[in-house]
Structures are given as structure tokens and as C-alpha cells.
Image: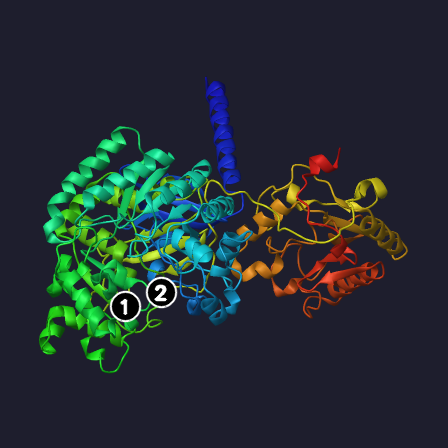
Amino acid sequence: MSQWLGALLTSVHMRLGWLCLLVRLAWAEPPFDVVISGGRIVDGTGNPWFAGDVAIRGDRITRITPAGVLRQAPAKLRIDATGLVVAPGFIDILSHPRHPSFLSDGRLVSKVTQGITTEIFGAGFTDALMTDESRAASPHLALVSLSGKRGFERWLRAMHPRGVAINFGSFLAAEALRSDATGTDVRGLTAEQLETLRRAVRSAMEDGALGIAFSSPAPLANQWSLHERIELAQAMAPYGGIYATPLRSEGERLLEAVDEAIEIGRRARVAVEIQRFKAAGQRNWSKLPQALEKIQAARGQGLDLGANTHAYTATEASLTACLPPGAQAGSVMENLSRPEVRRRLRAELTQDDPTWDNLCTLASPENVLLLSLQKAENRAWSGRRLSEIAAARKSDWVETVFDLLASEAGSVPALFFLMSEEHLALLMRQPWMKFGVDAPGLTPGAVAGLRHPQAYGNHPRLLGKYVREEQVISLEEAVRKMSSAVARRLSIPDRGELREGAYADVVIFDPRAVVDRANFEQPQRLSAGVRDVFVNGVAVLRDGVPTEALPGRIIRGPGYLPRPPEEEGDFLANDWVELSQLDPTIQLDVRYATANNFAGRVFYTQPRVFLQRPAAEALVRAHRKLRRQGFGLKVFDGYRPWQVTRMFWELTPADKRAFVADPSQGSRHNRGCAVDVTLYDRKSGLEVEMPSGYDEMSERAHPNYSGGTARQRSNRDRLRRAMEEEGFTVFENEWWHFDYKDWRRYRINDIPFEQLGK
């Protein structure tokens, strides 16, 4: 009996030992970059929250477990999220690109502190510099014509030349496109012009546009006929894009405008997204339930129709929105300087004309708040109501509008309080509603004067006022509408949800303290309660303080067709040779056929090295010369398809992109005339020491780096001499990268290894 018991105990002991070993082996993998433990996980799908841990490695979420499971997991950074909500980063579906003068500051503090990790442009008409005057004023963006070859691609890359904290994508702005084709001509498009725009739409969709977006301010909204809108939407339809538009009327003809949006969606067979959805003005509030019924009926009949809004009852627009559409074309100041024009406009303003929305009468002068006026004689009116200003000037509101627009050359931003809180809550409850900030990303103090507080407070206001305090919608539903609902609407893969394998866009906030602090008197106050924000696995906000990290990436639509840059000129025919066929004693360590590289991903299906024949033969000569010194060459990479170069660029943080090639220019690897190489010792067969590792993105990688050991520098310089003697030149940032002298004579290629190896 004792022997049996002893054997049993021994067996149990061995099994426990194996179990402990397996547990240790499970944690023997590389440490996580970040572990967020003990938080309330709101995963973005609308499902109820649960207590859990989240682990990040690289740019992806790698583990989501019940709370406490990752307690002992090794991690470079651990965050205790007890009492906090952990959610997917918010996606702002209604953003604006920044003015060219702000492009050097990509931190976007106003967005990051709201928990926003992705923003979507294209809702306005300033998405590109279209006119000769604006091109001359900003020569660094002079190549942004949307109608030219790869124009949308150039614009996307020009938006953030120095990097950006959050991800961004864009619709094709219809007004920018029309301006590029017709200038300021608001007449109907000719058949030839319309075909030009259709081609430009197709090109932009293949460059990654998320759809086509129209603008609301008259005369921009009214210059497009129904036929023209349908034609452009049909050109976009095969690419899976969204037709995004404000309603042509949000006031007097609200219901007719909803009918038009439905008709465009049906006839063009595209999904429709109504932007800034509202019923404008108290006399039109009763129409909102009818508009919602129309939308619900269209959805019931199979039309993919949705909308977005923001968390305020006020809308920002120019004071020109108080003028008839005809008065808004051309120079407002010039028009208003003539008494006869003023008399005509006054007569039009006093008529009951339902064909256009007069925001001053829809809101009433008491509910029009002027923002920043520039002229010294007008600055006292900043932040005051139109009715107050008219009374102080002993004038009526119409004459006050005329005078201020004439004095300020037509540039008078204002807030129009057009919505009711009751109807705003009604919109928020609609399952197809999403939320947008409707403002660009800013840094406090970068823009002087008053502005709409939505730029700094929209999403925290939703979470604080409408979720926590008024319980208009649940926390889970609010997060869904700010994350996965937008990602799915725009076909953005692997974002908008907390799940294993998704990009690590993560926000951590305190549900008890999140609040907007910006208001109409102090609109540039940062929100509170959002504690940490990660974009692609990199912290852009820690303990409420923005970092200097710029890990944001370009987001592209479902029709994106990655293409190498177009090249003109005469090139040599490709003459591919596989390096191992020339000299099998050259060692190969093709890192990109494994996960052992800077990105931790497999990019090649085969561990092979190809080069153009002259470059390959020169490399072999260098290898054989080194034999006399007791060394040989080990090759990490040679020819690289352009698609891989594109992936490298998108995976590399902006501050490290000096180490990778810009796909818009192509890489010398793409031409088959660049090689990544090091030395090995022929006696031992082992790779020699260098001042840095391969693929290391630091100053140690520079070929003239003076640090490291004398032996490491000697090995590096020996390699360089051998390669230069055979016509190679070292890349200025990487000791291992060498370009063959004839690289300019070969085209950029995007041929997979499988085809080269046939």
C-alpha cells in the first residue's frame, strides 16, 4: 500500500513539475510591450463591459484575458487600470485637415486628449490647395491637384510630412475636385468636365479615398445638380466608398433634402452618410421625427443609410450663411459696398423663401454668437450675440450683418444655436448614428480667438454629460458609436475594437471624471478624464500628458489599389539572377522571410535573394576578395518588391522613417540594385560584430558612427571598403545597405519572388 501511495505521489509530483515548466515556458516568449490590467473592458462592439487585462506587442493587441491572468506576464510597461475604462481608440468621422501653417505640429493635442486615435477628413472644401494663389502661398503643397495622376495620394502624404500623433484618412472633397476642374465657375458641368471628374473620382478611390464628400455652405451645396451628384456617386460605387453629404437643406426643406439623399443612394447604389444631421431652427424641429421615419423606412427597404452628429446644439458657420446664395458667390465685400446691392439683399432677406436656409432667421439674432473678428474696430463684438451688437450699434441685425461682412472681407465665423437638447438626445439614440468633432486637431494657443468648443470637448462631453449624467445612451453604446460603428461604416479593418489581432489603438479613461472643460467663453480648454492613449501600440498620452510620439498612419478605403510610382524615361531590361546560383558560399539570412526583423512580421514567402545581374556579379567579386582576408559576405536582403517597401513605410513610426524608403519615390531595393549585407568569419562561419544590429533604427546604424568597439568599427569599415571597390555606395543611415552604381538605369519593380524564381 505504501509503495502504491509513494508511486502515486511521485506521479503527481512529476505532473505538477511539468505543469510548472509549461507555465514558465508560456512566459518565456518575449515580454509584452504593454500590459493594461484590471480595467473595465468596453470592447467597442456594444457588448457589456467585463473586467480584464489587455496586452500589446508591437502595433497589435496580442492578448485579452479575464482580469488578473496577465498579472505575472513580463512587460516593458504595466498600467494599473483599476476603476478605469479600457476602450478602443475613438474614430472621429467628421474632421478637417489642418491649415498648412500647422502641419509642422502633428501632436494634435485637442484630439488626443479626447481619446481620438483616428480622424477622417474630407467633410469640407479646403482639403487641397486648388487655386494658383493658394499654390503660390504654400509651395510645399504645390503638387496636390486632386485631378492629376495620383493626386489624392500626393495630398495624403503632404498632409503630415513630419508625422502625426493619430491615424488619418479622408474622403475625396467634391468641392476641391470641382474647383480644380472649373475654378470659381458655378454653372453646370459640361459632359467633358463631368467625365474628367469621374476619372478623378476613380483615381482617388484607387489611391485610398473612403468615398466622396460634399459640403453644406451655399453656394457650394447648390452648385451640384442631382444628376452630377449621382454620376460621381456611380463612379465611386465599384470601389465600396461612401457618399457623404450634409442635407441640402436642414431647415425649411429638410424632408425634401432627406428624400434627395435617399434617391441618390438608390439610383447610384451606394451607401449614404448624412453629415451634421439636424433639424435647424425651432420652427423646423417638428420635422425631425418625420425625417427619422423616412430614414428608417429607407433602411427597411435595403438602403444603407446612416448619419453623424456632434454633442452641441450650436453649429459653426460663416456669417455669410445669413445671405441669399447669390450674394455668397464672388467677393462679399465688393457686393456689400454698393447701396443698391444692400437694398436688393434686404428685400430678399425679408421674403419667406423656402429654397434656402437663412441661418440668422432660423436661429434668430439672439442665438447667433460671433466668434473672432480681426479688424480693430470690430474686435469688441467678438463673443457677443448678433442682437446685442445690433442694439449697441443702434441698428437692426440685417444692417449689422452687412456692415461686419463688408468690414471683415466676408470672413466672420459665428455660432448658430439651431438645435434643441431634446432632439439632440433623440438623434444620439438612433442605432445608425455616429459622432464627429467637426473640427481640426489643434494645440492650445496655436489659434487665437474664439471658436466652437467641440474642437476640444466633443467626445468627453458625450461620455460625461450624455452618458454619465443624463444617461441618454449607455457607456457601451457610446463607445460603439465612436469606434467600431465608424470603422465598419468606412471599411477600416482591424480598428475600432478591442480584440486580439487588432491594431493597438487604445484609450483609458475614468468614467466618473471624464468631462469637457471647453465652453463658448473659453473654447480652448483641454478635456479631463482621459488618462492614457495608445496609437499603433505607442503612447501618445500618458497620465493625461501628451507625449512627443508621432505613430499615426494613413488609413485607406476598400478600393485602395497600391501602385508603384509612375516613371518616365528609358530603362534597362530586367536581368534577374538568384545570388545562391552564382556563389553558394555567400551566406543568406533573409530576415524578411521570418519574423526576426524590425516589424516582427513575415514579408516574403521564400528566403531567397535576387539582384540585377551586374549588381550580383559585383557582389560576388567583393565576396571573393574578402576570402583572402578570412571573411565572407552574409546577405540579409536584395531585391524587394515595391509592396513590401510600402508596408515598411506604413509600419515605421514617422520619426524613424529616415531608415526606410518612401514608397512614393520607390526604393533602390525595388530596382534590384541594393543589398543588405554583413561579414562572416570563414573559419568559424559566424557573423562578425558590428556597431549595431541589422535593422536597428538608431545612430549606431550610421556608417560613420564613432561609438562601439574598435573591432566593431574595423569590421564595418572593412565591409565598406570591399563593397566600394566593386561599385557600391553605402547608404548614409545604415552601414549594411549598399546601392550599386547603375541603380538609376532600372525601373521600380513589384514582382513577387515566386515569379522571379520560375
Residue 667, placed above or below residue 577 = below
Residue 130, placed above or below residue 36 = below
Mark seen at residue 524: 1
Farthest residue, direction bottom? 376
Give the residue displayed 83% in from the left and 40% down from the top.
581
Where residue 325 appears, x then y in whole percent?
A: 26, 58
Question: Could you tell me if residue 593 is visible in this image?
Answer: yes
Amino acid type shown at disc 1 = Gln
The quarter in which the N terminus is drawn is top left
Amino acid type shown at disc 2 = Leu
Chain-order first, disc 1 or disc 2: 2
Q: What is the count of numbered marks?
A: 2
User: In terms of depth relative to the viewer, which is nearer, 685 or 473?
Assistant: 473
Farthest residue, direction front? 340
Where residue 94 appears, x then y in whole percent?
A: 33, 52
User: In terms of depth relative to the viewer, which is nearer, 703 or 97?
Assistant: 97
Residue 6, placed above or below residue 285 = above
The quarter in which the C terminus is drawn is top right
User: In terms of depth relative to the viewer, which is nearer, 282 or 61?
Assistant: 282
The residue labelled by disc 2 is 442
Where residue 618 appears, x then y in whole percent?
A: 84, 53
Q: What element carries label 2?
A: loop
Q: In which quarter of the image is residue 737?
A: bottom right
Q: Is mark 1 on a helix, strand or loop?
A: loop
Give the residue displayed 78% in from the left and 64% down from the top.
717
Horizontal arrangement in the rendering, residue 703 relative to residue 322 (left or right) = right
Horizontal arrangement in the rendering, residue 31 relative to residue 582 (left or right) = left
How many C-alpha atoms fall within 10 Å of the one at disc 1: few (<14), some, or many (≥20)? many
Horizontal arrangement in the rendering, residue 706 relative to residue 7 (left or right) = right
Question: Could you tell me if residue 521 is visible in this image?
Answer: no
Residue 702, placed above or below residue 576 = below
Mark seen at residue 29: none
